[in-house]
Every structure is written in structure tokens, then in C-alpha cells.
Image (cartoon, grey):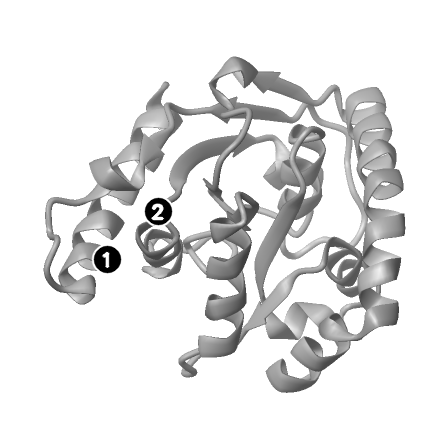
């Protein structure tokens, strides 16, 4: 499904109504399944800001990471920034549409999705981003930092363990393993960068900071 078509479908009134209706039920189901079957544990949940614009960032080791992040934040409504090809996958695509996710594509500016994401943040909402862009990739992309800087948001790093053991990228059926989500220290946009004149410089500096805080929560 193309990026433009995904955005058009997301903005339809029926789609928005369906998202509002299904989101709470989906989150409850995720929590029951992952806590009951995979012993999902969230470490240091007190670090999660109660309100205000928030960009959640996490490592990406499995296709189920998005479900895990959603289950770990029952008190905040999450909007995911996700690769457009995932919307074509049977289960994952339905999940993304239910979450009201925003599609992004490689080699595109993705201005419409980023603009919508910034609007979400300016309304005090929550964006969830896997800054590596793809599963098991080491490079940190600049999208999450850009959103935090432009949306004047707090950036919250997570480190997820266990999902690679539950469902590796090359497997289709899950195995039993414990899943843990470690919440790092929140960092406000004003702490991400000292570059105030050029957005490009600010985002580059904020991306470096993001890489550091993700490494810190991983070591912890």
C-alpha cells in the first residue's frame, strides 16, 4: 500500500471512529496476552511522564515490538510512525491501522506524516518510533529527534529484551520467553541539543544524544 493511500485511509471519518473504538480494547488484549503468556514486565514505569508531548523511542528486534510498546503504555494513547510496507502485512497491518499509525517510506521526505506527527505532539499526544527504522539495524535515524525538536516534546528511551527470543525476524511462530521493557530517563527537547539556529544542526545533535540515551538504558 502506498504512503499516500495509507494516509488517505487513515483520515477517513470511518477509520478515525474505528480507531477510537478499537484502541482501548486492543491495548487491554495486548496486556492480558503479554503479561499472562510472556510475563511482560515494565521496569521503572514511574519515569513515564503523566502528560505533555512525548516521543517514545525503543530498540527494534522483532515484529512484535510495537505490540509490546503499546501494552507498556496503557495510560497514554500512542501513535506509531511505521514503515509503509508493514501496512500490507495481515496482522501487523490491522494493528497499525487500529493504532492510527502514520506510514513512512524510504527515500521520501514523508512530509505529510511528519506534519501530522508534529500536530499530535503539539496537542500533547504521544508518538512511538523505532529510530533504527528496521529490525536489528544499528544506525539511528533522525526522525525521532526531529519530532522531539519540532514538537517541543520529551523523548523517552526504552530498551526491550525477550522479543527476539519470542519471535525472531526469520520465524513465523512465537516461542515462550520473558519480555522486559526498561524505561530510561526522560529527556526534554531543550536538553537534546544546544543548536538553536538551524533545525538541521539541531536534529543532528539531538540524534547523537538519542543514540547515547538508548545506549545508556540498554546498559542499565
Using the image, tell me which numbered label, if any, was put on residue 203: 1
Q: Is residue 199 left or right of residue 27?
A: left
User: Helix or strand or loop: what does disc 1 sit on?
Assistant: helix
Q: Residue at x 63, y 44 (%)?
A: 65
- Quickly name the residue at label 2: 152
Coordinates of residue 29 in the picture (x, y in percent): 87, 35
Q: Nearer the viewer, residue 131 or 111?
A: 111
User: Helix or strand or loop: what does disc 2 sit on?
Assistant: loop
Q: Quadrant of residue 82?
A: bottom right
| Numbered marks: total | 2
Q: Is residue 69 left or right of residue 53?
A: right
Report, in whole angstroms, how far the alpha carbon at label 1 lies from the one at label 2: 12 Å
Coordinates of residue 70 in the picture (x, y in percent): 68, 39
Q: Is residue 35 visible?
A: yes
Q: Residue at x 61, y 20 (%)?
A: 42
Coordinates of residue 172 in the picture (x, y in percent): 78, 55
Coordinates of residue 132 in the picture (x, y in percent): 42, 55
Amino acid at each position: 500500500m502506498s504512503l499516500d493511500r495509507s494516509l488517505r485511509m487513515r483520515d477517513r471519518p470511518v477509520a478515525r471512529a474505528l480507531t477510537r473504538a478499537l484502541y482501548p480494547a486492543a491495548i487491554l488484549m495486548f496486556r492480558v496476552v503479554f503479561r499472562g503468556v510472556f510475563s511482560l514486565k515494565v521496569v521503572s514505569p514511574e519515569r513515564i511522564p503523566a502528560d505533555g508531548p512525548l516521543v517514545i523511542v525503543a530498540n527494534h528486534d522483532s515484529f512484535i515490538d510495537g505490540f509490546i510498546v503499546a501494552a507498556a503504555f496503557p495510560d497514554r494513547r500512542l501513535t506509531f510512525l511505521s514503515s509503509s510496507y508493514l501496512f500490507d502485512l495481515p496482522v501487523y497491518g490491522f494493528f497499525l491501522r487500529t493504532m492510527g499509525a502514520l506510514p513512512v517510506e524510504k527515500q521520501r521526505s514523508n512530509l505529510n506524516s511528519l506534519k501530522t506527527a508534529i500536530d499530535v505532539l503539539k496537542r500533547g499526544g504521544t508518538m512511538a518510533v523505532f529510530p533504527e527504522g528496521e529490525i536489528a539495524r544499528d544506525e539511528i535515524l533522525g526522525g525521532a529527534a526531529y519530532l522531539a525538536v519540532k514538537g517541543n516534546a520529551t523523548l523517552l528511551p526504552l530498551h526491550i529484551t525477550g522479543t527476539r527470543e519470542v519471535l525472531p525476524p526469520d520465524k513465523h511462530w512465537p516461542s515462550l520467553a520473558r519480555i522486559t521493557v526498561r524505561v530510561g530517563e526522560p529527556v526534554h527537547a531543550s536538553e537534546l541539543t544546544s543548536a538553536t539556529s538551524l533545525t538541521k544542526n539541531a536534529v543532528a545533535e539531538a540524534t547523537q544524544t538519542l543514540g547515547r540515551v538508548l545506549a545508556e538504558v540498554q546498559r542499565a
